[in-house]
Amino acid sequence: MDLLQISAVILLIATFGIVVRRGFSDWVHAYRYQTIILAVIVSLIATVTNILELYLVAALTFGIKAIAIPKILFYVTKKLDSPIKLEINPYVTLRSSVIISALLVIMSYFIALQLPIRSNEIVSVFLPVSFSLFFIGLFIIISRRKALSQIVGLLTLENGLFLSALVLTNGFALTIEIGLMVDILVSVVVSSILLFRMSQTFDSVDIRNLESLRDD
Amino acid sequence: MDNLPSLEHILGIIQVIFIIAFSPLIVGLMRKIKAKSQKRVGFGIFQTYYDILKLFRKEEMVSDQSSWIFRITPWVNFVSAISAGFFIPVFFVHSPFGVVGDVLLVVGFFGIGRFFMMLAGLDTGSSFGGLGSSREMMISMLIEPALFMTLFVIAGFYGGTNISTIVSSAHETSFLAVPGILFALIAFFVLMMAETGKLPFDNPSTHLELTMIHEAMILEYSGRSLALIEWSNAIKQMILFTLFINIFIPWYIAEQISFIGIIFGIITFILKVTVLGSLIAFIETNVAKWRLFRISDLVAMAIASSMIGMIFFFL
Amino acid sequence: MYGIFVLFSLGAVIGLFTRGHKNNVYFTYIPAIIASFLTIVLSFLILFSEPIQVNLFNILHLFNFEILIDGVSAFFLFLIGLISFAVSIYSLSYSKKLDDKKNNSSLGLFFNIFIISMILVIISNDVFFFLIFWELMSLISFFLVIFEHENKNNVNSGLTYLVMTHFGTGVIFLSFLLLYSHTGSFSFDSFRDIGLVPQHIKDIVFVLVFVGFGTKAGIVPLHIWLPKAHPSAPSNVSALMSAVMLKIPIYGIIRYLFDFNSIDTQDYVWWGIGMMVVGSISALVGVLYALIENDIKRALAFSSIENIGIIFIGLGLSVVFASFNLMSLSIISFVAAMFHTLNHSIFKGLLFMAAGSIHYSTHTTNIDDLGGLIKKMPWTALMFLVGSIAITGLPPLNGFISEWLTFQSLISIFQIPSSIFQVVLAFTILVFALTIGLVVATFVKLFGIAFLSNGQSSKVTDATEVPRFMLVGKSILALLCVLFGILPFIGLNFIVQAFDLSYIPLNPFEPISIKNTSGDNFASLMMPAAIIIFISVFAGVFVFVRIIGGKTKTTKYGTWDCGFGSSSERTRYTATSLTEPIRRIFGVFYKPRDNIEHEFYSEENKYLKKTSSVYSITRNIFDELLYEKVTMSCLSVLDKIRRIHTGKINAYILYIMITLLALLAFTGFGING
């Protein structure tokens, strides 16, 4: 119980790492730490529930999400033309977004309390955390301007979904799991290519540029 | 009031003297570690004592534009810092003066010191003083919500704002069992850095108008007053370290009055303070001073952290 | 008791008849001093004996003028007596300032009647007379606000005050009518059997009472009259208004909450939550505006809003605890609120009198024109410093005690058995703490800019210390600040006695302590001992420094000016620049706008600047967003109504005919149906 709680807390703290930083590579670092902790949590759940499959899932998470995806993203960051690799002027200031994220965490704990599914300890510990990850990911997507932060936000959101699915169902069939992971990998690759194209076309990765795609 | 000053009271006084006496040492130690980690030689760790002693004997210069506020500020600061020290258990759980005041009184004592400090900054009429007061005003206003929220979480988990109560129940429960405390720890750590003027917030070793906050307020002080201010800052830092250690990592603090227990308590306390001091010195080496208006981001982090701590407490 | 009224009226009347006389001031205010002293004595007499209930006369068995002075009234009587005692002494000298240009006796007349009307509001036990005296109080204070009516601004603010206060009175009237319709009597005694009234009526009445009294107390967003009216009045009156008159609505709310109702079920929770939310907003908004205000009296007025907010936080918390049946906690937060009421009266009275003294000797209240007053007016400066430390809630003065109690009761919210409420209430802590932080900044600014450093404007160099009586008036309250701070049990026991709370009175050598559910010591505070520690440490340090430092020399020299020659007035930090960082942080709220204007030596060369001036503007979002819209829409509606007035007599007669027909038809249907 203690260990589970503590790991949940550390996961939350790692998620805040994405919210409080401004640099592109800082986000990717923070995302990597977050995913490593997620992998640890998955293996913890595996030991508690004694489902051997989950170890494999943990290994997959580690391999794909904590090594491959950050590698791609680091590569992208390095190759980007834009000289300033910082989120300079987000829609919501950094200090407000920290506070709002904390409020989102509080909200998700409340929502998780209201839901009737509290079958065991794992659910009651990790479900609120997964909700918070989900909402914080959404919030990152909403509040930031740079395309890279959108990707990181999406990945955080996905981590949240993954955790909640895992906690509620004690793991899907392994094939679906692998499929999902590969899906993410592909989506990251695709969006990275998009990012490149964007920075080549507009000389920046500010998503405001996408507004010009609208047909007026 | 009829019981005689017992062993507890004597121990309490010893703890205060301990704080007063060793606080410059910690400052010296942290400076030394910082110097070493920046590949400098640095002063000896006792240099702070020599500085204070030297300043006490020096002639004092007072601005002719200042008033008595300027003169009494070092005294108010020093005395309020020491008075705050009376309520802090150092190596022995029960501070005998615990019944007199709680952690809010300690905050209040720090507050009165800071209030006079800001006034003294304005008193000399130099724009440096005003600049320092203005920035100090902003930071002290910002950290207040985070501080009270953190105190709320700690008081809630450990059943009281009385510091002895907090420490003894913290000693009984490991903080790993209560995840909310972990968030309170993060918040408290940020606050501690802010209150003691450590690097992302303030850089006390420069005298550059772009960066200085605390130094700008005390720019006009010299001689005995400066010594008092330096020392009271050291005491304040020591008190905050002690609070941090005894609230979050109170292991091996003496519970009963026994010779071995207390010696053991003292040794572990010194060890813990050294480790904490070195940790902070390393952090200071690694980070740069933040722009003034980004400090609020850092404080927002502390507030957020204590808010999440609160939700863990209510669940 | 009648002596009080006789003396006040005597003061009023004699003052009026001896106008132009040399000693006019003494004739006016000395009776007031004696009468307020008698008021204090009276309140103490009632505390330690039985409540007084006198039936003076009644009209038609409906309007019954009955006086009831119980503990609650006695507490507020004490407040009125205390502050008017100090203020009357202060006025002995203060009103001399007006002698040459002003009809002084009318100020004395209004001053006395104002105090009488407040006392009458507190002691009347009947709706009808309560409202009459309430109205009297409002009107007299209106006259006092526009007393210096040469200034156009003052008239304007007086009108704002008049409109807002009548809005409040109207709402209070409505609430009493609603109660009357269910109890069938105008006496407060009948309201005490409120159990007969259905819950939803009680809820409606609560909202009306809260809005009505809240308008007078200056809760946000009904506060706009307060920062206009208080600074406009002469300073002795603004001291009375801020310190005492704002507490009368609190008396009304307490009557309704705790006297008429007995809060024991969870139906009442939202009352408390509502009060806390409004209180928190008031506290924060009040102090945010106080911070950027450069006019000392306006800043103090905004700070009154903040303190009223803190009082409401305490009261609301008390209601919340009571509705969950946590009686001991409810009592603690109630005591906190009442102690803060008492303290706020004391230090706000003190601060307004000090502000008045500044105005008396420098003829300005704008702190940017001041500076270095501490050398010219050392005693006033000391008093203002005491007031500032007290209001910022720092030990060892009285503000600390009440804020300590408030915070302790806020911490105890974890005992409420509902986690939603816990989390909602916990945010109050954030607001409360932020408020305290901002108050410190505000008063550092006010004291620092006005009194410290050096001032070179002619206003400051000509300033002298104010006359004796003004100092005496202030020092009474300053001493009380210290007394209630280091010996808080006096104040606490007084409150416990007055409100008849089931809380064991403290004995002097006992700490104020709060126990948690398991009976352990949750928190305790023993100010006398803390003071003893403080003083003995001071003595010890003094001796220690003497021993190791020996005797050292002190030299005076000029402040370091970076080698630029004498530092002038222009290099000083101004009030605006001092608060600039905070203004930036709360930019959403203030919407600051800086206009920088440059003047050049020649138009061609833009590099040689002659002067640069910065104008910094902050906006009052309440005035702009709320009231302007309300006013605009009201005006447009009224414009439409105005079209009815065509000016033709035929049309008016048509209206009369229509009305008559309508009434007849109405009655006809009434009889038939």
Image: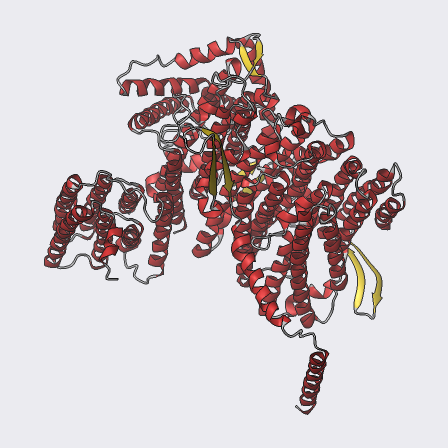
Say above or below: C329 vs B230: below
Q: Residue at x 59, y 27 (%)?
A: C452
C139 left or right, relative to B217: right
Q: Residue furthest left?
A: A175
Q: Nearer the viewer, residue C217 or C496?
A: C217
Q: Position of residue C536 (x, y in %)?
A: 59, 21
Which picture quadrant has residue C584?
top left
Q: Residue furthest bottom?
A: C672
Q: Position of residue B197 (x, y in %)?
A: 41, 28
Residue B198 in view, yes or no: yes
Q: Position of residue C347 (x, y in %)?
A: 65, 38
Residue B257 in view, yes or no: no
Q: Nearer the viewer, residue C226 or C278?
A: C226
Q: Residue at x 53, y 49 (%)?
A: C620
Say above or below: A11 vs C570: below
Please state, as top left, top right, bottom left or bottom right, where the C terminus of chain C lies in the image: bottom right
Q: Position of residue B123 (x, y in %)?
A: 56, 24
C329 left or right, relative to C458: left
Q: How is the image coloured?
A: secondary structure
Count of marks overlaid on the render: 0
Q: Nearer the viewer, residue C112 or B31?
A: C112
Q: Nearer the viewer, residue A131 or C669?
A: C669
